[in-house]
Image (tube, coloured by chain):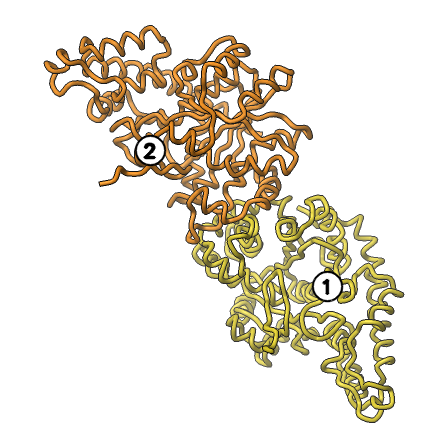
Chain colours: A orange, B yellow
Amino acid sequence: MAKKSEKITPWEVSGNVDYEKLVKKFGLRKIDENILKEIEKYAGELHFMLRRKVFFAYRDLKWLLDKYKKKEKFFLYTGCGPSGPLHLGHLQTWVFTKWLQDKFDAELWFQFTDDEKFLFKDKSYEEIQKWTYENMLDVIALGFNPKKTHFLIDTKEANLMYPEAIKIAKKINFSTIKSVFGLTEQANIGQIFYTSMQAVPAILPSVLAKKNIPCLIPLGVDQDAHFRVSRDVMPKLGFYKPAIIHGIFLPPLQGITGKMSTSNEASAILTTDSSKEVERKIKKYAFSGGGATLEEHKKKGGNPDIDVSFQYLKMMFEPDDTKLEKIYNDYKSGKLSTGELKEYTIKKINSFLKQHKKKREKAKKKIKKYLK
Amino acid sequence: MAKKSEKITPWEVSGNVDYEKLVKKFGLRKIDENILKEIEKYAGELHFMLRRKVFFAYRDLKWLLDKYKKKEKFFLYTGCGPSGPLHLGHLQTWVFTKWLQDKFDAELWFQFTDDEKFLFKDKSYEEIQKWTYENMLDVIALGFNPKKTHFLIDTKEANLMYPEAIKIAKKINFSTIKSVFGLTEQANIGQIFYTSMQAVPAILPSVLAKKNIPCLIPLGVDQDAHFRVSRDVMPKLGFYKPAIIHGIFLPPLQGITGKMSTSNEASAILTTDSSKEVERKIKKYAFSGGGATLEEHKKKGGNPDIDVSFQYLKMMFEPDDTKLEKIYNDYKSGKLSTGELKEYTIKKINSFLKQHKKKREKAKKKIKKYLK
């Protein structure tokens, strides 16, 4: 049988994701030592997600940093599609975005694509609104600077967004949408239009400031499709193309291919999971790269590269390179058992979530600060 | 050669418009004596555009009047696509709408589809905004009750409209758009989405009032396509289907087929044309049903049914049935010459436009009263 081919659209990620292939297919640049040096020069340090190439590719990032060098500051744009509880994979991009905000003292426009989720999911408008509220709490909990962070809920800021969206929409035809997103004639007409709304925050600050401001978009690589389409449009409207930095997906519990997803309870750790629940999920589901038996593991060692717990540490929960390397080596040699690796990962995740939940609770009183 | 087949979409009207055929094709009901009696019962009289079947067809009008009888009042919804100066054909529908507002003491929601015109015309956003302003002046000049009339400019009221539009859009696919509007894969994605925005005012007052309110839409029959699509959607969202009353097109100067259009200067009389200009256009362009020579006309008579000047009188400028009948008979017999008929028509149009221009000037100070 043929290998299941990957599918990467903003609404579906399936099959084995081959990031090397995506770089070529989408026409991205790979994050390399040169660009890392550039970033370090301005940021003073490198986030571990950069050092470890969790953010692995980019578009126009050199151009953006050159602008920054010439005192032309950029703003950040990222977003959240509110259709259910959030999981660790969602937070990963935003933890990195927060670091960018802090290091580059950047304004952040944070889009909540409630229209998208309503149009693409079999959920009511009201349910999507509920999740918009819930998801905002998680975003605020990550500590974005309220003075420099602006939430854009698509249906609430339509007066600002729709007029810009139609300017973008006028330059995109259905034929393009079909080929880039794989939408068919059975797609509803809101879905077909939607990408214009996702493009807007990349130009909106420039529209409001009445001058061109460079934009950097940290995103999961599945979202690149939107900007493959709209980046071509923006110069036609007189705006810069936004720069992009692409993250790999935090893997689902079952194995290191694909993307953590809320639709499958067994695949995701939610931001609202109890510590017991996290423990249960990791112990029960987290795919292990260890030997078949403890005996065998001690003898032959394990494979951290396919071990989901190790990947969580590497991608999100163990910022300390020395510690991570030791775990890697010990697991590979068999010195560290799967049980011990899982225990460590559970401890790390629960320590993060404990803090997160406290901040999430406090966020309820802070929402207004982030809305226009 | 085959007869040029008609094409009737909101964006193109060409060929011979056969209204009888449209009634069948679109599944409309014809305005007949029964429904006229019903209207007269509540309105106290019949507008000459009804008596003369200028409004010739409807959907669900009996249902609407039954509701009215049971003290369930309806609101009116009509609109204007602002892409250039307005001509008499535009005003015709609204003159009738004003009568409906007065007779049924109805709220009117008046949509300015600036998004549509931007998306469908090769014009800039700024130019469309300019025409929105200019067209509002004409609408206000017609004397709608400012306390009961609400202007909805799509891009300015997107906060209200976009959330409802996506609810409608979710239930319409591209396949339907293709077959109803004839849009292709080359259509831009704003055009494809647009019909959802045109549907919104038919439900918006119900959304805002949190209860179902019947709606009546007076429109030119080319606009029916939008509601053939969205009327099926509205009950699925819990709303009444809007009732519709359809007008025939005020003919272009060149002849009684088709529709007056601003794109062809020689086809339309604009609301801003000077009296000299009106005179010149009617004398030079208005298709005549008269004999080839004055001699022949006096002998054999003319044909008012294909005479454009006569049609203008019948459809818009001679409300008096007795006078109109005399003109009809005198022209048919040859007693009234084409020159005389044209002079009378010029006088009538200029008398209307003189008043209209005065009111249009005063309208500049009234715009705020009509905006939300």
Tell me which chain the residue with mark 1 is part of: B
Q: Are marks 1 and 2 in contact (CB under 8 Å)?
A: no
For residue B50, say whether it is visible. Answer: yes
**Residue visible at 27% across and 17% down?**
A346
What percent of the width, then of the height, locates residue A52? 38, 16
What percent of the width, then of the height, locates residue A249? 36, 27
Q: Quadrant of the C terminus of chain A?
A: top right
What percent of the width, then of the height, locates residue B341? 84, 79
**Label 1 crowd bin: few (<14), some (14–19), many (20+), radius 10 Å:** some
Left or right of B83? Residue B3 is: left
**Residue visible at 83% across and 88% down?**
B297
Quadrant in the picture for residue A88: top left
Q: Residue A262, which numbered label?
A: 2
Question: Could you tell me how far apart the alpha carbons at marks 1 and 2 are, in whole angstroms?
Answer: 55 Å
Left or right of A370? Residue A31 is: left
Extreme residue toward the bottom, this view: B299
Quadrant in the picture for residue B322: bottom right
Q: Residue B91, which numbered label?
A: 1
Measured along the vertical axis of the image, is residue A356 above or below residue B46? above
Q: Quadrant of the N terminus of chain A?
A: top left
